[in-house]
Image (tube, rainbow, N blue to C red):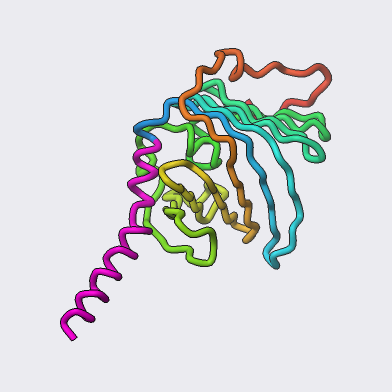
Amino acid sequence: MKHQLLGLVLGFFVTTQAWADGVAALNAFYRNTNSMRAAFHQTVKDAQGNIVQEVEGKMQLDRPNKFRWDYNKPYEQQIISDGKDVFLLDTELEQVTIRSLDQAVGMTPAALLAGGDGVDQNFNLKNIKRPMLESGVEWVQALPKEENGGFERIYIGFKEGELRYMEMVDSFKHTTAIAFKHVERNPRLRLETFLFKMPAGVDVVGE
């Protein structure tokens, strides 16, 4: 009986350790990742679980606060931060939205990943279990402290210390899931990568 009880306790401890390091993995990401480059697959579902958008692209970041996300067709967009301002280019609408980085921090997943070490200043972090998804992934839940951030909650998944997944639920209950692949940690990135070039003939929104 004692051996059975010990086995249950140890089994619970090992299981807990397997998923309890999401926050530690996120903190290690901020501590050890100065730059990153990866391909991604993004799926957006509505509140009923229907897929309303599916797109692939490439992302790059140079911490702190510089990032670039290039979305391919059929939803061709660019999101670029030069460390001061964030530019969102919608090719189909021929429109560029500009916001200061201060407005974007805590509002977008891109800004969350590229931000400084103070992620816990904008989010309440919590280790969670998501056993229905891929095994071996350590998950952390990030709840925005500001209610006007656009997202109700964000999930970030790491496997063997590598960023693999992000999932965001917005105020309309839409879910945006991002899977990363071909992740390169700390590549040398050119400064020009994060300088936005204003296309001719586009409308500009914001300052």
In the image, residue 7 lies at what x, y percent?
24, 74
- Magenta: main secondary structure equals helix
Pick the residue in front: 176 or 183: 183
**Residue 117 sits in which quadrant?**
top left
Q: Is residue 115 above or below residue 172?
A: above
**Residue 25 sits in which quadrant?**
top left
Q: Quadrant of the C terminus?
A: top right
* Residue at left offset 35%, top offset 39%: 28
Total marks drawn?
Answer: 0
**Residue 108 sits in which quadrant?**
top right
* Residue at left offset 37%, top offset 57%: 127
* Residue at left offset 46%, top offset 41%: 162
* Residue at left offset 41%, top offset 61%: 128
Residue 98 on the magenta span:
no
| Magenta residues (range) | 1-29
Which residue is most to the left?
2
Q: Is residue 84 above or below residue 164?
A: above
Residue 12 on the magenta span:
yes
Residue 142 in sight from this viewpoint: yes
Left or right of 118, for residue 188: right
Left or right of 34, for residue 89: right
Left or right of 193, for residue 52: right
In the image, residue 3 lies at what x, y percent?
19, 79
Residue 100 in sight from this viewpoint: no
In the image, residue 195 lies at what x, y percent?
61, 16
Q: Quadrant of the N terminus?
A: bottom left
